[in-house]
Amino acid sequence: MASRGYSRIRKVGEGSFGKAWLVRGRDGREYIMKTIDVKRMDKKQRNEARNEVKVLSSLKHPYVVCYRDSFFEEASGLCIIMDYAEGGDLADRIRKARDAGVGFPEAQIVRWLSQAALALK
């Protein structure tokens, strides 16, 4: 991975087919690298992973985390580089609030729904 210009800092998440890593690029900025173990996937799942890259690479919107790069690595599989959103994603915020027994103001929920709708436009 160092040959691609990214160095791992720490693991920030894990799912059924891969992991998410905080990485540093050659430019000194932090990114998220999602690694997907395509070897464990069937053909349909591999196609879905390729389609995810196509969709992410075509999205350009201020309310969507920006796709930067993707590549295959023998050890890690498919690697997708995205901008790092330091505060986490919306699911993280909802989970943390739920675990703390705290709700969100209605105005905040309306803002999030509006942003999501605009991103899907």
Image: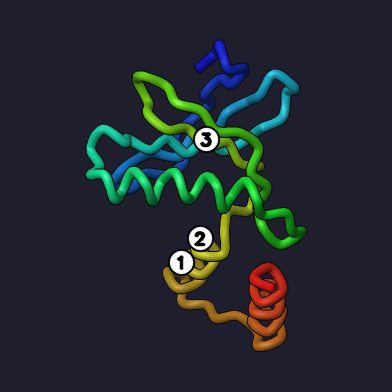
Q: Which image quadrant for residue 81?
A: top right
Could you give the CA–CA distance between mark 1 and mark 3, rounded to whole angstroms? 22 Å
SS class of the residue under badge 1?
helix
Question: Is residue 85 or residue 71 the one in the foreground?
Answer: 71
In this picture, is 43 found above or below 121?
Answer: above
- If you read the primary sequence from the N terminus, does the residue marked by circle 3 or circle 2 appear first? 3
Q: Which mark is residue 43?
A: none
Tell me which amino acid carries mark 2: Asp
13 left or right, relative to 120: left
Residue at (76, 59) in percent of width and height: 62
Residue at (39, 51) in percent of width and height: 48
Residue at (63, 25) in percent of width and height: 24
Question: Is residue 77 or residue 96 the one in the foreground?
Answer: 77
Question: Residue 25 in the image: x percent, y percent?
Answer: 66, 24
Q: Which residue is mark 3?
A: 33
Residue at (44, 34) in percent of width and height: 11
- If you read the primary sequence from the N terminus, does the residue marked by circle 1 or circle 3 appear first? 3
Q: Which residue is mark 1?
A: 95
Q: Nearer the viewer, mark 3 or mark 2?
A: 3
Could you give the CA–CA distance between mark 1 and mark 2, rounded to whole angstroms? 5 Å
Quarter of the C terminus within the rendering: bottom right
36 left or right, relative to 4: left
Q: Which image quadrant for residue 114?
A: bottom right
Q: Which mark is residue 92?
A: 2
Q: Which image quadrant for residue 38?
A: top left
Q: Nearer the viewer, mark 1 or mark 3?
A: 3
Could you give the CA–CA distance between mark 3 and mark 2, rounded to whole angstroms? 17 Å
Question: Residue 8 in the image: x percent, y percent?
Answer: 52, 24
